[in-house]
Amino acid sequence: MIFHVTLEKAEDGWIVAECPALPGCVSQGKDEKEAIENINEAINAWLWAEDRKALSALPKQRGQTPIVVAV
C-alpha cells in the first residue's frame, strides 16, 4: 500500500509527519529520514489497531473463521 504523508518542521526543530488518510496518525523525528521511518511504523500500528477493532466487532458465527490477507 502507498500512503501520502506531510512533513512539517516544528518550532522545536523536530520534523512532524502526518498521514492525512488515517485520522490521528502522526509521528515525528529528529530529521526527515527518522520522521519517515517513524510515520511508517505509526501507519502500520494504526492499520493493525483498526483491524483489531473491526475483528472484535464481527458477530460470532459458526463455520466462519476470519483469515489474514497481507497487502
Image: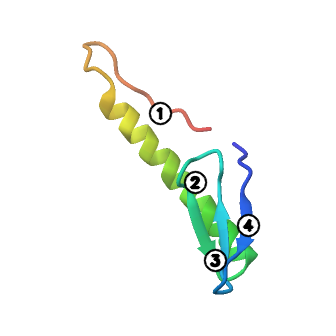
Q: Quadrant of residue 13?
A: bottom right
Earlier sequence position, callout 1 versus callout 4: 4
Choose mark 2 or mark 4, whichever is in front. Answer: 4
Q: Quick one: 26 or 41, which is closer to the camera?
A: 26
Distance of label 1 from label 4 (alpha carbons): 32 Å
Q: Earlier in the sequence, mark 3 or mark 4?
A: 4
Q: Which residue is mark 3?
A: 29
Query: Measured from the top left, where is residue 39 in percent x and y?
Result: 62, 62
**Horizontally, is 4 left or right of 62 in the view?**
right
Q: Quadrant of residue 38?
A: bottom right
Point out the tag, 2 or 4, that comes first from the N-terminus. 4
Q: Which residue is mark 2?
A: 43
Residue lying farthest to the front in this orientation: 11
Q: CA distance from mark 2 to mark 3?
A: 15 Å
Q: Is residue 2 above or below residue 40?
A: above
Residue 54, horizontal then vertical, whole percent: 39, 33
Q: Residue at x 45, y 42 (%)?
A: 50
Amino acid at dot 1:
Val
Q: Quadrant of the C terminus?
A: top right
Badge 2 element: helix
Q: Are marks 1 and 4 in contact (CB under 8 Å)?
A: no
Q: Position of residue 5 (x, y in %)?
A: 72, 56
**Residue drawn at (33%, 16%) of the image:** 64
* Residue highlighted by disc 1: 68
Of marks 3 and 1, which one's residue comes earlier in the chain? 3
Q: As rendered, which of 62 and 58 lies closer to the eye?
A: 58
Say which amino acid is labelled 2. Ile
Crowding at mark 3 (Cα within 10 Å: few <14, some 14-19, many 20+): some
Q: Secondary structure at mark 3?
A: strand
Q: Looking at the picture, which amino acid does disc 3 mark? A: Gly
* Element type at mark 1: loop
Q: Nearer the viewer, mark 1 or mark 4?
A: 4
